[in-house]
Structure formats: structure tokens, C-alpha cells
Amino acid sequence: MTQTGEGTGTVAVSGDIDDAVALLIPRLRRMTTEPTTETYSDADLASFIEAHPLEDARGEGPLVESETDPGTLEENPDWTATYDLNAAAADVWEEKAGILAQDYDYSADGGNYSRSQAYEQAMKQARYFRSKRIWKTVTMRPEPLAQGSEELGDED
């Protein structure tokens, strides 16, 4: 297996998708300061990674439209597993912030405890990684109206 794109936040790994994701989990752990499986199992992190597939170097995505009528989406066997780790890391940080959101600041025995700083730091990390994600565009195409249907417009 080969791994490319180290400094870009995208990693393409040739081989089985499960193997590709397994290679990326340690890096995502470092990006999210989750060195153990105590909070996030490998399967948890794999789901974050798999939620952000990208087109590979050939411009192919993980799904292709089938040639059936009507067309459906099927797995693309020619796709080289490529994922946006920055987007995955941002999702993990946002989830961590959600857990920390219930913490509040308080004073006791002459001390001040600013527990909300942990939430603020997690959100700061989420924004940082979200700003480094790969931008995606969506091409919209109009579908023809079915025969016999009325065009949407002014209703009397």
C-alpha cells in the first residue's frame, strides 16, 4: 500500500478501503489528541473518516451512477480510497465540544474554576480543522418534469 498527500490534509491509499481507513486512524488520533481507545474506538474514528470521502486523483468518487433506469448509486470499484482528515478531525472536535458544553465556571473555597475553557478550546480546534478541509462543490442539474405534471408556479 502507498500513502500520499502527507502535508495536505488529504491522504490517498491504494488497496482495500478498510485497510486505507485503518492506516489513517493513528493520524486522526494525533490530530484530535485521542491516543487511546478509551473515548473513541478505532471503529468510531473509522466512521468519522468514512464520512468524508473525496474524489481521487483521477476525479473518481466512491460512488458511481449505475446504468439502470432509473440510475442508482453503486460503489465504484476503481476509486482509490481518499479521505479528508481535516473534516473528520473537525467533526471529532465538535463532538468533544458538545460533551464539554455542559461544564460551567464556578468558584469554591476561594478558587475560581473556568471549566468552560475546555469547551472553548475544543471549538477553536474544530474551527481550525474545518478551515483546512477540502472544499467541495455540488453540480445541480434540472430533472425534466414528469409527463402530465403541472409546472410549479403561480397558484390561483
Image: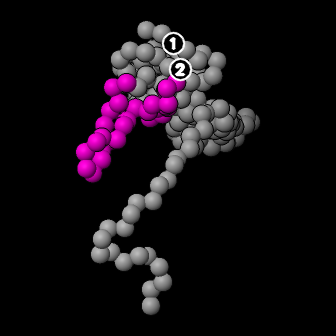
Picture residue at 61% right of the left edge, 33% below the top: 133
Q: Is residue 4 visible?
A: yes
Q: Is residue 126 visible?
A: no
In the rendered image, which residue does mark 1 sit on?
3
Q: Is mark 2 on a helix, strand or loop?
A: strand
Does the magenta portion include 57? yes
x, y (%) of residue 127? 65, 38
Picture residue at 44% right of the left edge, 33% below the top: 61
Tell me where the magenta segment starts and ends, as one range: 51-78
What kind of residue is marked 1?
Answer: Gln
Dominant SS type (magenta):
loop
- Tell me whether circle 2 and circle 1 mark residues in contact (CB < 8 Å): yes
Picture residue at 52% right of the left edge, 24% below the top: 57
- Residue found at the very far left of the displayed protein: 68
Q: Residue 11 carries which label?
A: 2
For marks 2 and 1 on the same chain, the one whose residue lies earlier in the sequence: 1
Does the magenta portion include 67? yes
x, y (%) of residue 119? 62, 38
Report, in whole angstroms, how far the alpha carbon at label 2 lies from the one at label 1.
Answer: 6 Å
State which quadrant residue 79 falls in. top left
Query: In front here: 71 or 6?
Result: 71
**Quarter the N terminus occupies:** top left
Rate crowding at label 2 as few (under 14), some (14 to 19) or many (20 or more) other CA atoms within 10 Å.
many
